Image (cartoon, rainbow, N blue to C red):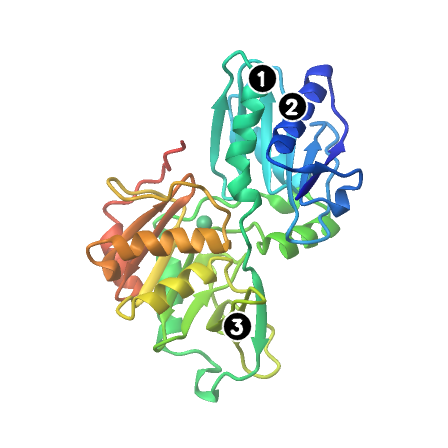
Amino acid sequence: MNYAIYGTPTSATHERFGELLAQALEERGFARVPEPAAADVVVNLVDEDNPKPFRRASKGTFSFGIVERAEVPADRLKANYPILVRSLSNIALSYTPEQAVWFTTMERGDYSELANGDEADLARRVIGRLMPLAQARLVIDNEFREDLEPELWDGDEITQEIIEAGARMGDLDLLPAPFPIEELLNERDLRHVKLLYGIGGLSYGNLSQRLDETRFWMSASGVDKSKLEIPSRDILLVSGYVEEERKMVISVPPLAEPRRVSVDAIEHWMIYQAHPDVGAILHVHAWMEGIQATQINYPCGSHELAVSVAELIAREPDPANAAIGLRNHGITVTGPNLLEILDRIEPLVLRQIPMI
Ligand SMILES: [Zn+2]
């Protein structure tokens, strides 16, 4: 594994912290390469006033942007999310010397490592938090096959229920206000984000419901879940998983113009295959009291997140009616169908996600 430094430090302390991060990477066996395009991990030293996007050539590259700030901003998400988006990073870091490093994720999670007087130690802990994320394997490619049976071309009662459940999520205000990602990016970078992150940045959460033993309908990525409309465009039939190529197989009618399926399709796939009695799965960026939660905040769409959520579901007393926390991110809930899940969680759901 290797890494590269990108961007331009805005101060001596910014530069110094970049070097400490480099050192921490080398302690873990990473070798420095001059060319970021060839690196597995890219440390982007970002100037807040003039962020330089690092456009990854491959999904396998993990890049994080780090800005330096004299003070920790009062509204961290508002300050740091644009850094994440503008630098096209997997995760954005805000460094306040001698105080803390704040992490902001695409899912809009926000957490910190606090300084303890030893900035090299802080850098080591930061790299320690990032490594599981950097080494996660993403399964966000789709392979569209025009093999959907004609009776499903216009959807069925399940796609209808998904549309209804999506609208109810909107009414419940469970969908966070969309972040105006289009206002922060030009068209080229917006395309890049959609391609590499598999999101449109317009909405969060997803919902799916089982069709038969192996297949399930699922909401598309980057679409407002309260306004799902057209089957095989906004709601897709997931019919397989090609593990070697890390691709979800989507069955569509001929000449369909499908969106990409939600990046969490791999997670739903694993749960449906392991638990034949799970009828539906809902994921929202909210929380519930007293739930088991994943230990590491792996990125959406990663094999590792899917495995850790599926394992927690399997350990629940009733996996077919379970709710699991995704650390710093949200919940995944199973049930017989989506409307039943909504009935069950509506009185319990908390909009504030604990950040640790
Ligand atoms: Zn999510």
* Closer-to-camera residue (340/210): 210
Furthest toward the top, the residue is 117
Picture coordinates of residue 176, whole percent (x, y): 45, 44
Q: Which of marks 1 and 3 is nearer the N terminus?
A: 1
Using a 10 Å C-alpha cutoff, classify the residue at mark 2 as few (fewer than 14 neighbours), some (14 to 19) or many (20 or more).
some
Numbered mark located on residue 20 in the image: 2
Contact? badges 2 and 1 (CB < 8 Å): yes
Q: Of tags 1 and 3, which is closer to the observer?
A: 1
Mark pair 1, 3: CA separation: 46 Å
Mark pair 2, 1: CA separation: 8 Å
Using a 10 Å C-alpha cutoff, classify the residue at mark 1 as few (fewer than 14 neighbours), some (14 to 19) or many (20 or more).
some
Q: Earlier in the sequence, mark 2 or mark 1?
A: 2
Classify residue 232 as left or right of residue 54: left
The kind of residue tagged 1 is Glu
Task: Name the residue carrying label 3.
Answer: 249
At 33% from the left and 66% from the top, the residue drawn is: 274
Q: Under tag 2, what secondary structure?
A: helix
* Quadrant location, the C terminus: top left
Furthest toward the right, the residue is 34
Classify residue 186 as left or right of residue 137: right
Q: Is residue 164 above or below residue 108?
A: below
The kind of residue tagged 2 is Leu
Picture coordinates of residue 185, whole percent (x, y): 69, 44
Mark pair 3, 2: CA separation: 43 Å
Contact? badges 3 and 2 (CB < 8 Å): no
Classify residue 103 as left or right of residue 321: right
Q: Under tag 3, what secondary structure?
A: strand
Q: In this view, does 141 lie above or below 325?
A: below
Task: Name the residue carrying label 1.
Answer: 119
